[in-house]
Amino acid sequence: MSNNIKLKNVFTLKEVLEKAEQHIFAIGAFSPRYTPMIPSVLRAAQKTDSPVIVQISQKELERYGITPAEFAGEFYRCIQQEEISVPAALHLDHTKEFSVIVDAIDAGFTSVMIDASEKDLAENIGISREAVAYAHSKGISAEAELGKIGTTDFVETDKDEELYTDPEEALKFVSETKCDALAVSVGTAHGVYNVKQPKIDISRLKAIRQLTPVHLVLHGGSGIPSSMIKEAIHLPNGGISKVNIATDLELSLLAAIKRKDRMTNLECKALSPAHLKLAQDAVEETVIEKIEHFLGSAKQAVSFQMKEGE
């Protein structure tokens, strides 16, 4: 099965975020981390009639032992064999290496994220501009990051350093890189909130929005109270359009099978049918809950005009 088959309900990141911003909701960018959990994410979106983004980062690919082609293959298999009809995008999250971006695009990902946020502004702009140009030349979308988003478990990123996004720098960055979406650092963090309490700097988010029209992305969506998420979405002139959620999915999976430690993808695929069903059902339930009570994207598939299949 070709991962590059054109399906009428598979969109680029830019296409789905335009609809989200227009209709004032956010789309969940769910990282299932294990390929057997990809169907759970897509089934949840189908049941709630919600657009959805399925994603994985470079570090997650490495940590769980998955190739971009393997991840994309399961995404397209599920959409076709389970007749998933809601709008969907396949996104490569935090990525440092250009070669991984190339591999993901070749595998059929419809958007990629270049993360050079640890570099100074000029170097970040240069690296991001190159990646964005390449993605656009292939007809797909590109996300970039400005500021440093903290972490607590180092699965998606290398460092726990946090540096809030400067609105003036955001204007320069977006203008020069031409990115389709911007991941901003406004107080959230990747991983589980144990000591640090989750927060969203709404005033900073408003300032960024006033200076640039680019679609805004909130990383570290797991564990954030729904009231904070909803406030960030419902900003004048458009707020957050994409919310990344990964840790909550894995925690529900592990709890369902009464396991404490993470697995590799091969270990997940080797689970007994009974344990696999428990895990898949738990992830599906978590995604449904996020769609219905955090993102406001339930029943928003109607917002999309499906493309003609090829």
Image (cartoon, rainbow, N blue to C red):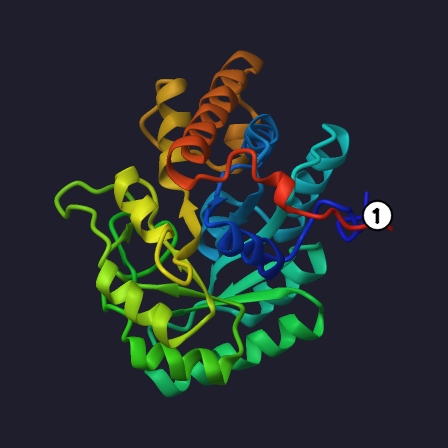
Residue 222 to residue 105: above or below: above
Which residue extends farthest right? 310
Residue 97 to residue 119: above or below: above
Q: Quadrant of residue 270?
A: top right
Residue at the image point whose x is 33% and y is 73% from the top: 118
- Residue to which mark 1 is pinned: 309
Residue 128 to residue 240: above or below: below
Which residue extends farthest top? 274
- Looking at the rendered structure, the number of numbered marks drawn on it comes to 1
Q: Is residue 225 visible?
A: yes
Picture quarter with the N terminus = top right
Residue 70 lies, in percent from the top left, at 65, 45
| Image-based side of 132 in relation to 117, left or right | right
Residue at the image point whose x is 65% and y is 55% from the top: 109
Query: Badge 1, how many Cα within 10 Å: few under 14, some, many 20+?
Result: few
Residue at the image point whose x is 70% and y is 75% from the top: 137
| Image-based side of 170 in relation to 65, left or right | left
Which residue extends farthest bottom? 122
| Image-based side of 8 in relation to 274, left or right | right
Residue 152 lies, in percent from the top left, at 24, 49
Q: Quadrant of residue 172?
A: bottom left
Residue 198 to residue 41: above or below: below
Q: Quadrant of residue 210?
A: bottom left
Which residue extends farthest left? 195
Residue 279 lies, in percent from the top left, at 47, 22
Q: Is residue 161 visible?
A: no
Residue 262 lies, in percent from the top left, at 38, 34
Q: What kind of residue is marked 1? A: Gly
Residue at the image point whose x is 53% and y is 55% from the top: 22
Which secondary structure lies at badge 1?
A: loop
